[in-house]
Amino acid sequence: GSDVESNADMCPMHVRAPVDCRDDASSSVESEHVGEIFGPSSRCLMTVEEDPICVKGICNELERTFDVHYHDEVFQCRYGGQIVDTLFGVTLKCPILAAVCPQVVCPSNCSGRGVCDHSSDFGSTCICDNPYDETDGCWEVT
């Protein structure tokens, strides 16, 4: 065959080599996203377009969130899979909180006596099987 036939299986994809967001030296890597931040507090998140992006992320234990810093703004991830519109042309998918901030998920994983509600306005909270148990981690023994 012709050149057309030999190139028929070629897929013009943009592939980015693995980059450690926590390494300051990675900032020299060419990026599609203006505002990427590399350094010890940076984490790799995915955009809704499935593009990786390095952003500064801090575990906020007080609010039980993962706070994403992008273009001098702070966006709160309250649960994994949450979609965050940065208002800068990049829409992020929040990581699973237990993976990036295990200390902010439900205390003691609700002690096996409840479910963790990640969509609460107050961060992750336990909904205890016992409706009278008002402890944070469903610790009350009946």
Image (spheres, rainbow, N blue to C red):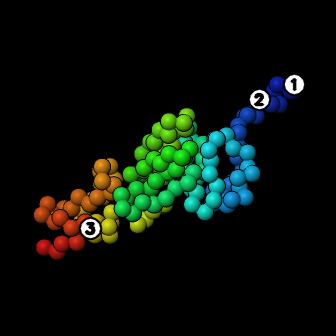
Q: Tell me if 23 is positioned left or right of 136 in this view.
A: right
Mark 3 vs mark 1: which is more N-terminal? 1
Q: In x, y percent, where is residue 59?
A: 45, 60
Please say if 57 is above or below 141.
above
Q: Quarter-wise, where is residue 47 in the image?
A: top right
Q: In x, y percent, where is residue 11?
A: 72, 34
Which is nearer the eye, 22 or 138? 22
Residue type at numbered disc 2: Ala
Task: Name the image quarter holding the C terminus.
Answer: bottom left
User: What residue sits 47% from the left and 48% below the top?
Assistant: 74
Element assignment for label 3: loop
Q: Tell me if 118 is positioned left or right of 16 in this view.
A: left
User: What residue sits 42% from the left and 45% below the top?
Assistant: 82
Q: Quarter-wise, where is residue 101 in the image?
A: bottom left
Q: Quickly name the residue at label 1.
A: 2
Separation of residues labelled 1 and 2 (CA atoms):
10 Å
Q: In x, y percent, where is residue 5?
A: 81, 27
User: What residue sits 50% from the left and 40% below the top?
Assistant: 86
Residue type at numbered disc 1: Ser
The reply to whether residue 31 is visible in this rendering is yes
Please say if 29 is above or below 129.
above
- Given the current orientation, which residue lies at the most extreme bottom position? 141
Task: Name the image quarter holding the N terminus.
Answer: top right
The reply to whether residue 104 is visible in this rendering is no
Q: Which mark is residue 53?
A: none
Mark 1 vs mark 2: which is more N-terminal? 1
Q: Quickly name the residue at label 2.
A: 8
Element assignment for label 1: loop
User: What residue sits 73% from the left and 49% below the top?
Assistant: 29
Please say if 51 is above or below 113.
above
Q: Quickly name the residue at label 3.
A: 137
Separation of residues labelled 3 and 1 (CA atoms):
67 Å
